Amino acid sequence: MKKKIPALILVAMLAVMLVICIVAVYSDNTPAEPSLKVPTVPTKPTEPEPTEPEPTEPKPTEPKPTEPKPTEPKPTEPKPTEPKPTEPKPTEPKPTEPPVRPTGLDDKDFVLITDYIPSAKVALPYATKYNFTGCRIYDFTDAYLRYGTTMKLQSVSAELEKQGIGLIIWDGFRPIIAQQKLWDVFPDPNFVSSPTTGRRTHCRGNTVDISLYDLKTGKELTMPTEFDNFTPLADRDYSDCSPEAAKNAQLLEQLMVKHGFKPYFSEWWHFEDKTDYPIEEKFDPAIPRVWTPNCNEFIGMWDASGKVFARIPKGKNMQLIGWDELYAKVKYDGKTGFVSPSYIVPADPDYFEKSLSTVVPTSVYTYDQMLEDIKLLEQKYKDIIEVSSIGTSELGKDLPVIRIGKPDAKYNVLLQGAVHAREHMTSWLLMAMMDYWLDRDILSYGDVCYHIIPMMNPDGVAISQTGILNGTQNAIYLRDKKNGLATQNKAEYIKTWKANGLGVDLNRNFPPGWETIDDRTEPSSQNFKGTKPFSAAETIALRDYTYQYDFDTTISYHSSGSVIYYSYGEKKGVNAASKSLGKAVLAVSGYPLKDIAGDSEAGYKDWVMDELEIPSLTIEIGCGNSPLAMREIYSVFVRNIKVLPTIAQWLQKQ
């Protein structure tokens, strides 16, 4: 037994030593302990993870381009394309739901037909001399209809295009003034609606005159007659035309009826939308409807209270609704409000190029440029205009007058501009109005002779435009400065010069109320009335020319303020007539009327109203300070472009 005990002890001792060795080995590597600590120290490995995830997080974002979303549209894209073949179904009750709705258009709004039917060929005979009247009826060349009517016509066009056929637009919306001109030439209610008692469907904007053409060849298809054939051959009894013509006319009629139009029996080309609209008296196709901001970033849109509630960014388009005193009323993004006319321009960059053939838009229209333009217009229209002179300025410049029409006409009208030097944009405006209307048969609006004096004060205009003073004018400047009348710097003083070359304010040099003016007693850049009425060469020349003709009305153009002054003195008859004319001009320009019977003195309008009792207006253009900035020229031109025919129309109603 004694021998076994030591052996057992030895075995035990060996076992203990083995355990100690094993423990020693594990304690050196300590893998078990750290593994137990990992759950408690995850913050350390996760700290770098937030920095690592940045490269790894983008990875989840990278799939986004390859996410099903971009691939989903692909299966859905065919769906929008699928409806296209069935889109011509806009013949169903509401063809006006297409994508244009987000722009805020209503069925009653006027739109350009070709914006919705690009394949349509527009050929308006009334925009040329080649129609039954022999003269140009429209001063525009684009065709417009109500939006709802256009959508129906779009459906007709879609069906025709499948057959290789396109639409020819001969007529769309027709202004009342044009309807009157047609009636004056051909007062037959079977073919021309009376402008006062007839239905006047074209004036409602829901009636169109159309024909057909081959989309491949561009040639018109054979139809029963030409446009405006006022014989039984033009009616819808197709037995008296060729089988081919009958077939084409019947195809057109069937599709138009299918899509909501009523055919007129006496004219195979004439169709009226079954949806009725009121006669439109304000919309004018000659006025650009789409405008865009003329600014660096955006313009504000105000509500009626004057609060800005929207912004129109540069590059976006708005629809012009009309002019309202100092503002333009517009529709943008479904909202209606007011913007400054000074900061908008027609969206069509070629608007002036299309409107004017000779006169170029500029804010600095010089005397020499005016003479050159007069010469070009005289050469181009030598049969209807005559150029002469009413006299010379104080510094010897000729004062040209352009007569459009014959002086023995039933009515004579005088228009003059730039009587104040810094208001020289009025010279450009009068020349532009002539250029525009000479190309649009202004004489067809009535038996009127227009006498236009574009620049009454060329000496003063030269001062304002060039910034140069001669010795006499510099002496005026030094005296005004000494007397505290030249508070701005010299360059600004010269730029805002109003008087003639000798320091006489020409529009204070006429007799009525002359003696009451006493604010400046010496020649000055403005407001000096002269030594006596008609003491200036320019006012003498205008007086003598006015005496030569029995003028029915006169218009004096000034800047600025966007307002019409119509009254003077206490003579009720001439004041009432002037106000009546003012209302007619207000209707086309948006300029409000202002009564200044007790405030205005010694001006040309005051003199002709007081002494000669000629109904007269002073029209103040623009919104900013004179000289007006170039940005004003667009709205100024558009607001005044209808003044000449409006005068003719007003005279014939008296």
Image (cartoon, rainbow, N blue to C red):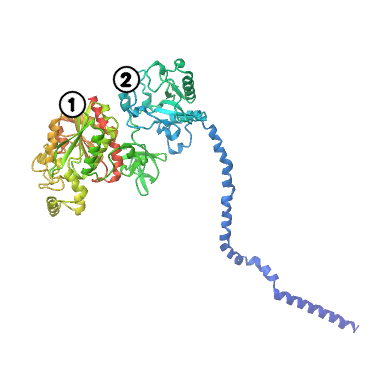
Q: Residue at x 79, y 77 (%)?
A: 18
Left or right: 32 in relation to 416? right
Q: Is residue 86 above or below residue 193?
A: below
For badge 2, the amino acid type reads: Phe
Identify residue type, mark 1. Asp
Does any portion of residue 144 appear in the rendered image?
Answer: yes
Q: Quadrant of the N terminus?
A: bottom right
Q: Is residue 278 visible?
A: no
Whole-number angstrom distance, CA of label 1 to CA of label 2? 26 Å
Q: Secondary structure at mark 2?
A: loop
The residue positioned 69% from the left and 71% from the top of the image is 33
Residue to which mark 1 is pinned:
408
Q: Secondary structure at mark 1?
A: loop
Point out the residue furthest to the bottom here: 2
- Give whichever of 337, 295 is nearer the camera: 295
Earlier sequence position, callout 1 versus callout 2? 2
Q: How many marks?
A: 2
Quadrant of the image occupied by residue 136: top left
Check disc 2 and report the residue beneath it: 186
| Coordinates of residue 390 in the picture (x, y in percent) | 15, 36
Outermost residue on the left side: it is 531
Q: Which residue sits at x=56%, y=63%? A: 51
Question: Quadrant location of residue 340?
Answer: top left
From the viewer's perspective, is residue 246 above or below residue 570? above
| Dot 1 and dot 2 residues touching (CB under 8 Å) | no
The percent position of residue 222, horizontal first and vertical second, equals 45, 23
